[in-house]
Amino acid sequence: MPSKSEAQHNAMAAAAHGRGKLDIPKSVGKEFLRADKARSSVRRKKPA
């Protein structure tokens, strides 16, 4: 399942690298990052 927002992507990346503070399992973070990479279109905020 790919991330729905930039904030979710960042939280999952932190979890995947063992730096998360939200009790997200490392395996779940890695799964999200793989899905994001496959989809390659995380919704990111556009600069103003």
Image: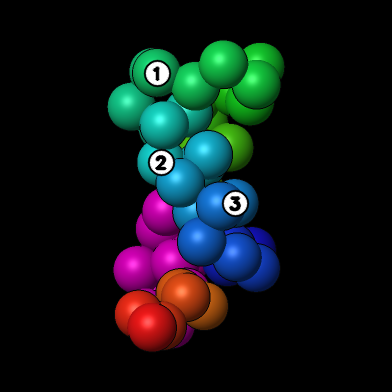
- The residue lying at 59 percent from left, 51 percent from top is 8
In primary-sequence order, the first of circles 3 and 2 is: 3
Vertical placement of residue 11 versus 25, above or below: below
Q: Is 34 positioned to the left or the right of 27 in the image?
A: left
Quarter of the rendering occupied by the C terminus: bottom left
Q: Residues within 10 Å of mark 2 (few under 14, many from 20)?
A: many
Location of residue 47 in the rendering, given as x and y in whole percent from the top left corner: 35, 80
What residue is shown with label 3? 8
| Kind of residue at disc 1 | Arg
Using the rendered image of the protein, determine whether residue 37 is visible from the camera's viewpoint. Answer: yes
Q: Which mark is residue 36?
A: none
Please state the extent of the stretch shown in magenta in the rendering.
Answer: 32-42
On the question of residue 32 being in view, the answer is no
Residue at which label 1 appears: 19
| Whole-percent x, y for residue 11 in the image | 53, 39
Dominant secondary structure, magenta: helix
Task: Point out the tag, 1 or 2, that comes first from the N-terminus.
Answer: 2
Q: Distance of mark 1 from mark 2, alpha carbons?
A: 8 Å
Residue at the front extreme, as displayed: 48
